[in-house]
Image (tube, rainbow, N blue to C red):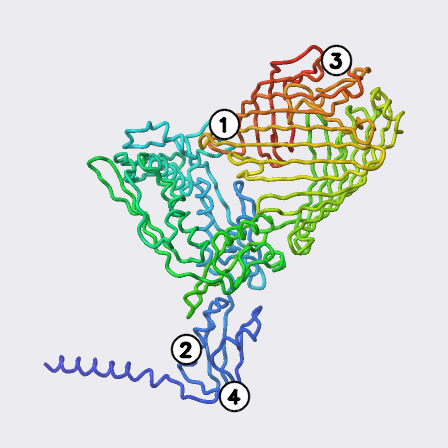
Amino acid sequence: MQFTRFRLNALAAVAALVLAAPSAWAIDPFTVRDIRIEGLQRVEPGTVFVSMPVHVGDTYNDDKGAAAIRALFALGLFKDVRIEVNGDVVVVVVEERPTVANVEFVGTKEFDKDVLVKSLRDVGLADGRPFDKAQLDRAEQELKRQYINRSLYAAQVVTTVTPIERNRVNLTFTVIEGEPAKISEIRIVGNKVFSESTLRGLFDLDTGGWLSWYTKSNRYSRAKLNADIETLRSYYLTRGYLEFKVDSTQVAIDPNKTDIGITINISEGERFVVSGIKLVGNYLGKDDEFKSLVTIRPGQAYNADEVAKTSKAFTDYFGNFGYAFARVEAVPEIDRVNNRVSLTLQANPSRRAYVRKINVAGNTRTRDVVVRREFRQLESSWYDGDKIRLSRDRVDRLGYFGDVSVETQEVPGAPDQVDLTLNVTEKPTGSLSLGAGFSSADGLGLSFGLKQDNAFGSGNSLGLQVNTSKINRVLDISTTDPYFTEDGISRTIDVYQRTSSPYQDQSYYKLVTTGGSLRFGVPFTEIDTIFFGAGVEQTKIEPGTLLPTSYADYANEYGLTSSAVPFTMGWARDSRDSALAPTSGRYQRANAEWSFAGDARYLRTTYQFQQYLPLSKQYTVAFNAEAGAGKAMGGRSYPVFKNFFGGGLGSVRGFEQGSLGPQDISGTVVGGNRKMNVNLEILTPFPGAGNDRSLRMYGFFDLGMVGGNNGGLVINDNASALRSSVGVGISWISPVGPLRLAIAKPIKKYDGDKIQTMQFQIGTSF
């Protein structure tokens, strides 16, 4: 009993001491006379003083001391912080974290060092920053994530931390990349209507082929798989399978982390046909106009794309009248007994809105006026969705920005007003290029280019182009002001010298053309531009050897040097989805050149028409037609150096470049004042390249001719006759430009024609 009482008394005494300890150890508040900092090496004292919540003259207590320690730790610069009190002086003792002196990578072959350095900087680890073990762990995980994105699941990262003088460390990331994980199998389970091979053909991912080293289509990527699943879903939903769903997706990787199997389980559901469409809600009394926007047709299979397209068309049309917050919802009423679906389009235009203010954000170099002058939506005007979309597209087409988007914000307290913010991301607009190219026609040529599309952020462009090929030499200096006037009329000044010769031997004759021009572009509509201008040009015939008789006769009549004052006019319209690898859209251009003064007086016109029709995701039909004609003016002979030539890429493949056309009595092809060619192509994915658009095969049919008698000098009756050919080729968007290779077989030819079975060129698009 006494022992128990003694134990209870002892416990009570200990508890009393513990409870009393804080008050015994607490510092009595005092006025701070001075603050000293000890232990600093690289951190500036001002950084510490600014971060502390206590200053000279303040009253110091335990709470402020604790707050000061928390604030200094929060800087991330110190490994240890403590505060000591010496009378009325506060002493802050710190121990700085080591600083990262250098980051090195060993064994990294898949990535450039700059890519890895940037990824580590994003997680806070970089040269000159404080070293933190937690950041090091995050850096290792980030590196592994980068490798996983490249299907290198077996990649291992080992980090070595080496302390060096002045409290710094060197970091070395040693990477064992291993072999990439490749897709060995893709299975689609649950399909009944469409074959598994048909569905797998929709995917960008595949099990590989002989070109997988280039396309990397057999490397697993979660983002690519998600995109393929969406493609699969869209394929069913656009063919009437309204209740299609993906039940599950399994991605299995073997223990060696080199083989991946993908299994996608789907439920197709039944195919539904649209039985009817109803419009419900407020359509501003314009029901007929909205009905004309409906692309869904009763009696046809349900098509999710058409439903989305119609809903978007409705929303956009509401926006044209200022209803920025309109909502359109397509509600299906499903009849599962008869496999029919009725669609109700419910519209709520909400309220009409004005645009109060338009802001431009992200243009760190480009001047505001360069962006704002492309806007068709004005401030203090009705919100117009059509004009806003057009404005965004016009800014995007400038080519100065990597990303362009428009945000709409409601104005607080003003429900009928919105602000628009155009967000842009600057990208480099200048280029300096040095390179070499080779074609079967021009031989080896060196090229140099200096171009700045947005000089000093003004929107003006400056350019210098040099080409040193043996057949065609070019020196061209140009500048363009796209807004020479406030109405958007552009002005281009061009000064050039071009030397051409049909032979590679420098002793043969040449044509040297020197001149300059001034052109203006007038935007008549948002998609059509008319060009007109004038120039001064001088062409000199340098005889050399093998000078054609027609050239000699022209020189005898007008001299070896001919001057011209050409007036030019043109029109262009381009709706292709891509200039390099188009799959849909149309391109047209027409040009006329009229020399009304000088020695050479003529009229020369050309017209080109291109149409691209997508047959499917993989196949595209391309059609190109081009015609040209020239006519002498002012009672003079047509200048032979303005003749057209045919044959080769861009004309009739299978015949030597420039070999088609009239010949003079010397037997030399001198071209003619009329030309016509038609090209038909079917483009397909390259075997083993999946759906990669940068590398494609094509089959083609060419038909063309070059005509004109050139003053009766023609010696070959068949010179102006039609030629045709068929063949196959490869189109590759290579790092040095678009490359076209063609293997052709002439099917309509004549004796004496120069046949060239294989032809290729870098820098041509058709």
Q: Which residue is mark 4?
A: 33
Q: Which residue is mark 2?
A: 66
Placement of 395 over or under 540, stated as above or below: below
**Camera-side residue of 280 and 378:** 280
Mark 3–mark 4 distance (CA, rounded to whole Å): 109 Å
Where is residue 503? Give x, y as percent. Answer: 78, 23
Q: Earlier in the sequence, mark 2 or mark 3?
A: 2
Mark 2–mark 3 distance (CA, rounded to whole Å): 102 Å
Query: What amino acid is found at the position of numbered circle 4 in the picture?
Result: Arg
Helix, strand or loop under label 3: loop
Mark 1 in CB contact with mark 3 (< 8 angstroms): no
Q: Which residue is mark 3?
A: 716
Judge depth for marks 3 and 4 and give the one in front. Answer: 3
Other-residue count near label 3 (Cα within 10 Å), few / some / many at <14 / 14–19 / ≥20: some
Query: What amino acid is found at the position of numbered circle 2 in the picture?
Result: Ala
Where is residue 80? Give x, y as percent. Answer: 46, 70
Q: Earlier in the sequence, mark 1 or mark 3?
A: 1
Where is residue 336? Give x, y as percent. Answer: 21, 38
Q: Earlier in the sequence, mark 1 or mark 4?
A: 4
